[in-house]
Amino acid sequence: MVASEIIRFDHVSKEFEKNDKQELQVLKDVNLTINEGSIFGIIGYSGAGKSTLIRCINGIEKPTTGDVYFRDTVINNIPNKQLRERRKEIGMIFQQFNLMPSRTVFENVALPIKYSGLAKDEIKAKVNQLLELVGLPDKLDVYPSTLSGGQKQRVAIARALVNDPQILLCDEATSALDPQTTADILKLLKRLNDELGITIVVVTHEMQVIEDLCEYVAVLDTGKIVEQGDVYSMFADPQQELTRKFISTTSKLNLPDEVLDSDLLHLVDNQLLIKITYVNTEAIEPLISHISRQFEVDANIIVGDIKILQQKPLGGLVIILDGTKANIEATVQYINDQNIRLEVLDHA
Ligand SMILES: Nc1ncnc2c1ncn2[C@@H]1O[C@H](COP(=O)(O)OP(=O)(O)OP(=O)(O)O)[C@@H](O)[C@H]1O
């Protein structure tokens, strides 16, 4: 089945006027397509323009140039009344939850449909059903201040879903949560995507969120998308330095600087410390014995790891190669020829 597009950024740039009247270019010629039913992540450092980008999707921000399409509608060009209607199809959650402290959980979730013309009973049924869905059926009458961060975000998710939106925007939705609660919320988002078919767009500065949740990712560097694609391919073969930096934050293959800077590994003669990343995990054992036999090079494994991304394994090893200079060079050439990603971490 061909995936149909739900959101498209077409040459979107955004400038803000700074206090000194200078223009600040926050988005630079952004092009991206988000398919219906997918989970799409946008990762970047603080100030990269992530919030501005995601806010262009529901029309809170408007591009200075370029267009944002929601299906066939150019969302930045429609009159306000029509925009308000379209926004019902786009829910949003935030880092700080944005719940109203003086309203109960029920009232918070019901707020967006309070004046929708629905009967009280219908509103009650809808809110109950959503609180059930997010795992908080017994919290109807409590106030947000009595809830944990994770519970508050669940209420915010229920509220964001109350109009049965097609898209859920998540702006750093787990950044204020501890790792276990983050994992629980990501699991919930994944389940909502599975069960409701809702398209999810996530902006984050944490690669772990991309790894655990997303199918597609775009890397934003000071307003420019420097790399985008499916998450597995990007982890397997990142093209940009910034992408590699983000990926390294979730890797178990990082040797601490203290190890690399010290002589702990005792690299001598021609020894080479390398990291390899490979997609065909079954081929790796034969590869190691092959290089030992063919090139007379010893491969001492220091660390190994296998990740499962999009139900596919992605392996990595940190190895010391030991042999003559010529044989080690031939080994490196051979590994490169196998389409295995190889980085030299250190040498004697
Ligand atoms: N309304 C505005 N007026 C002027 N400058 C703005 C406005 N909104 C954002 N900016 C500036 O645009 C830049 C990008 O901000 P944005 O919030 O989109 O980045 P971000 O990647 O989401 O960062 P963070 O994670 O820190 O929020 C920042 O320099 C910010 O100060």
Image (cartoon, rainbow, N blue to C red):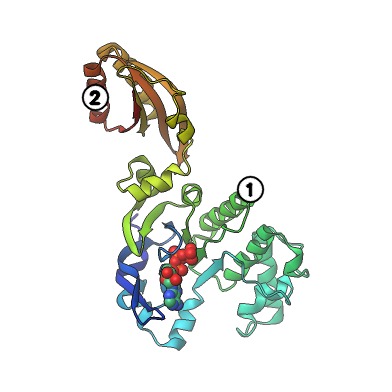
Nearest the eye: 287 or 247: 247
User: Which mark, by number, is residue 163?
Assistant: none
The C terminus, quarter of image: top left
Examine the image and state in which quarter residue 321 appears.
top left
Nearest the eye: 321 or 276: 321
Amino acid type at mark 2:
Tyr
Mark 1: which secondary structure? Answer: helix
In this rendering, is residue 267 above or below 152?
above
Question: What residue is pinned by disc 2?
Answer: 334
Disc on the earlier residue, 2 or 1: 1
Amino acid type at mark 1:
Gln
Q: Is residue 196 left or right of residue 102?
A: left
User: Which mark, by number, is residue 180?
Assistant: 1
Where residue 87 appears, x then y in whole percent? 48, 77
The N terminus, quarter of image: bottom left
Is residue 121 shown to the viewer in this render? yes
Q: Is residue 334 left or right of residue 24?
A: left
Is residue 60 shown to the viewer in this render? no
Examine the image and state in which quarter residue 295 appears.
top left
Q: Residues within 10 Å of mark 1 (few under 14, many from 20)?
A: few
Q: Residues within 10 Å of mark 2 (few under 14, many from 20)?
A: some
- Tell me the quadrant of ligand 1: bottom left
In this rendering, is residue 39 above or below 327?
below
Nearest the eye: 248 or 149: 248
Where residue 133 appears, x then y in whole percent? 64, 60
Where residue 174 appears, x then y in whole percent? 57, 57
Nearest the eye: 151 or 270: 270
User: Real-space Cα distance between discs 2 and 1?
Assistant: 42 Å
Where residue 326 appears, x then y in whole percent? 21, 18
Q: Are marks 2 and 1 in contact (CB under 8 Å)?
A: no
In this rendering, is residue 34 above or below 84?
above
Mark 2: which secondary structure? Answer: helix
